[in-house]
Image (cartoon, coloured by chain):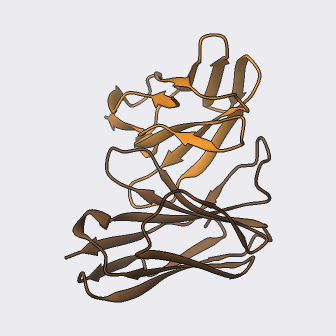
Chain colours: A brown, B orange
Amino acid sequence: ETGVTQTPRHLVMGMTNKKSLKCEQHLGHNAMYWYKQSAKKPLELMFVYNFKEQTENNSVPSRFSPECPNSSHLFLHLHTLQPEDSALYLCASSQDIGTPAGELFFGEGSRLTVL
Amino acid sequence: GQNIDQPTEMTATEGAIVQINCTYQTSGFNGLFWYQQHAGEAPTFLSYNVLDGLEEKGRFSSFLSRSKGYSYLLLKELQMKDSASYLCATMDSNYQLIWGAGTKLIIKP
């Protein structure tokens, strides 16, 4: 139990569907992240939020839309995805951003399959 | 450019010692992290090095040489539960984490 909870753990969707991934952290952290993890590839940072404000958007396609209503919750809204978007989506939190030695706490991920 | 290299897969025997290497090239340096990720689970923090030398934490140790752009994670007295992927990541001058692709460690009895 890392203190970061992601739902759903598994999601299968068609290319025309709209779905959302949810992340909640119970650690009192100020920063939250979305990462994409594909097999045998480095973690790809997608979005960063600090105190609910988006501070990073690493050229992510608009079919991925993040939402951070408060410092404890983070969503990733998905629409008109492509099969190549199939991956494990990891949420993480940290006390702050831009802090050396500030370790990340990850959720267990949402395994997404796009048909 | 920024780059992290680590072996894709390694195999070791229960009770033995294994060293997982990581070489890096990044814009600036604010430390190097090692994370462990069991299949289907969240990555979890193992170690952080920012100064040269060896940091020991139980059966796991992490080494850093900044001049060589090199780190390793040393696992002693291997146990079956150590079978996992080990992720190396550096923090650049903008405090962004740059990740390697991970090393899958297989432990055999």
**In this rendering, is residue A41 above or below A62?**
above
* Rendering quarter of residue A3: bottom right
Q: Nearer the viewer, residue A86 or A107?
A: A86
x, y (%) of residue A87? 34, 63
* Rendering quarter of residue B59: top right
x, y (%) of residue A61? 42, 67
**In this picture, residue B8 sits left or right of residue B41:** left
Quarter of the image that includes the N terminus of chain A: bottom right
Q: Nearer the viewer, residue B39 or B49?
A: B49
Number of numbered discs present? 0
**In this rendering, is residue A56 above or below B14?**
below
Q: Residue at x 44, y 66 (%)?
A: A89
Q: Nearer the viewer, residue B78 or B46?
A: B46
Farthest-out residue, left: A115
Q: Residue at x 40, y 87 (%)?
A: A19
**In this picture, residue A44 sits left or right of residue A39:** right
x, y (%) of residue A41? 37, 45
Q: Residue at x 72, y 35 (%)?
A: B93
Q: Residue at x 41, y 40 (%)?
A: B101
x, y (%) of residue B36? 52, 45
Quarter of the image that includes the C terminus of chain A: bottom left
